[in-house]
């Protein structure tokens, strides 16, 4: 799970109450959770919702009739970085094919965009990822790159905001009923 970028005024407002958006790195589900007393500042310029993991996988980039071999250096379900001699300028749409190790097979991303290129290294954002490809990428990242444990040690579980709101509303109702009963009890005597 990784904190996601806030979208819109509502998410910015509720983040002042410690309710932040998160994205599951394994299944891509986006949700909000309360983590009272914990702030999640984003470092300047960091906008990724998915954590990239270090890998060394052979890949191929294809743009039109031009193709180039590459080595994937980091990977997530939404993008990657590759080392390549190709000179695709930023904004170029490419097809990205990567071999996921000996038993992982090949994954082909039909549409990716070159976001940046710097000294033989290109950053790609996946635009169109098929359901099977996304599942295989997530399984590879989960099985090889991410720890198997269910989370970071020492992390306390977070509760959905709905549970907290229902609990607070329930306590208010109980308080109102008790205050009414006490007032009725005082006037009956």
Image (cartoon, helix red, strand yellow):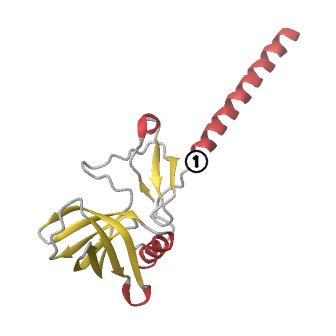
Q: How crowded is mark 1: few (under 14 residues within 10 Å), some or many (20 or more)?
A: some
Q: Name the residue under label 1.
A: 160
Seen at 52% across and 48% down, the residue is 33
- Is 62 above or below relative to 52? below
Which of these two is toward me, 37 or 58?
58
User: Which quadrant of the structure image shows residue 78?
Assistant: bottom left
x, y percentage for residue 157?
54, 55
> Where residue 60 sits in the image (x, y, percent)?
28, 79
Residue at the spot 40% in from the left edge and 67% down from the top edge: 77
Residue plotted at (42% across, 86% down): 105
> Count of labels shown?
1
Displayed quadrant of residue 9:
top left
For residue 80, side relative to residue 178 (left or right): left
Q: Nearer the viewer, residue 157 or 83?
A: 83
Seen from this angle, which residue lies furthest bottom?
102
Would you say 169 lies left or right of 66 here?
A: right
Q: At which x and y percent is residue 158?
A: 54, 51
Report the residue that reaches farthest toward the left: 119
| Secondary element at image label 1 | loop
Q: Is residue 101 above or below residue 179?
A: below
Can you name the residue that lies furthest to the right here? 188
Which image quarter is the N terminus in? bottom left
> Which part of the image, by quadrant, shows the C terminus?
top right
Q: Where is residue 161 in the image (x, y as percent from the top left)?
A: 57, 43
For residue 57, say whether it is visible.
no
- What residue is rendered at 29% in x and 80% in y? 59
Answer with the quarter of the image where residue 168 lies.
Answer: top right
Tell me, yes or no, if residue 166 can be seen here: yes
Residue 118 horizontal side relative to residue 129, left or right: left
Residue furthest toward the front? 65
């Amino acid at each position: 799970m990784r904190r996601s970028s806030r979208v819109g005024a509502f998410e910015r407002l509720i983040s002042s109450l410690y309710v932040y958006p998160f994205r599951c790195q394994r299944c891509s589900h986006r949700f909000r959770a309360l983590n009272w007393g914990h702030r999640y500042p984003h470092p300047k310029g960091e906008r990724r919702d998915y954590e990239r993991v270090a890998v060394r996988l052979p890949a191929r980039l294809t743009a039109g009739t031009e193709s180039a071999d590459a080595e994937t250096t980091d990977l997530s379900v939404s993008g990657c970085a590759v080392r390549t001699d190709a000179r695709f300028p930023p904004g170029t749409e490419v097809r990205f094919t990567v071999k996921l190790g000996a038993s992982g097979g090949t994954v082909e991303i039909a549409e990716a965009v070159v976001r940046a290129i710097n000294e033989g290294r290109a950053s790609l954002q996946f635009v169109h990822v098929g359901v099977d490809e996304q599942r295989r990428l997530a399984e590879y990242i989960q099985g090889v790159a991410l720890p198997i444990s269910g989370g970071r040690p020492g992390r306390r579980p977070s509760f959905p905001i709905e549970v907290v709101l229902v609990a607070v509303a329930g306590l208010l109702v109980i308080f109102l009923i008790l205050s009414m009963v006490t007032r009725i009890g005082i006037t009956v005597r």
